[in-house]
Amino acid sequence: MRLTKGTDIALRIAMRLAVLREQHPTTREVAAAVDVPYTHAAKVVSRLQHLGVVTARRGNGGGLSLTQAGLTGSLGQLVRDLEGVGDPVGCEDDPPCPLRAACRLRGALRGAQEAFYASLDPLSIQDLVAPPTGPVLLALSPRPTG
Ligand code: SF4
């Protein structure tokens, strides 16, 4: 199963923030460190704030931080929240698929999708930044981006 680019960016940002617990970087700094365009990162940070995963403080000494829920919450639930619910393929697209009312494949794909999310449920962002990933995340140096 392939996740959206936005979900991947969100998880990269969450992991970077997880290893910078006391540093509160700006969105621009995090975007540069994980090598994503600032505009994409800004949208994703806003979504993460809405989900209670990230907090942002303005002003001197302000910046982004990962919440405790963001650090230890279920990775599977976070990915569900970021991806949204729905069919993994476009059964209800315009035009809709003519098989959609009685499609065994649709049910099978929904089951496979839920099994994918369920496999991520026992994990958290905290688990993802254990070595060897955490030291690599810490070593990323923010480069200025436009
Ligand atoms: S064939 Fe089934 S799973 Fe595929 S788009 Fe149509 S309804 Fe959905």
Image (spheres, grey):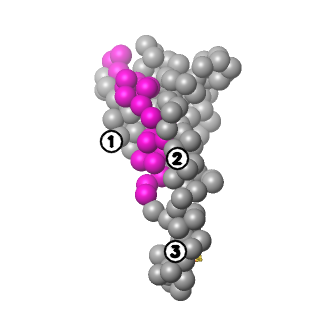
Tell me the residue at 54%/83% (across/down).
Answer: 99
Q: Mark 1 points at which residue?
A: 50
Q: Which of marks 2 and 3 is in front?
A: 2
For residue 117, which numbered disc appears in the image? 2
Q: To which quarter of the image does residue 58 belong?
A: top left
Q: Closer to the camera, 137 or 38?
A: 137
Q: Residue at x 58, y 27 (%)?
A: 128
At which x and y percent is residue 26? 44, 27
The local secondary structure at tag 2 comes to helix
Residue 56 % position (x, y): 34, 29
Label drawn at residue 91: 3
Amino acid carrying mark 1 in the image: His
Tell me the crowding category of disc 1: few under 14, some 14 to 19, or many 20 or more residues within 10 angstroms, Cα based.
Answer: few
Label 3 CB less than 8 angstroms from ligand 1: yes
Query: Which image quarter holds the C terminus?
Result: top right
Query: Which badge, 2 or 3, comes first in the chain's sequence?
Result: 3
Image check: 85 left or right of 5? left
Distance of label 2 from label 3 (alpha carbons): 20 Å
The answer to whether the residue bearing label 1 lies less than 8 angstroms from the nearest atom of ligand 1 is: no
Question: Where residue 64 appears, x then y in whole percent?
Answer: 40, 26
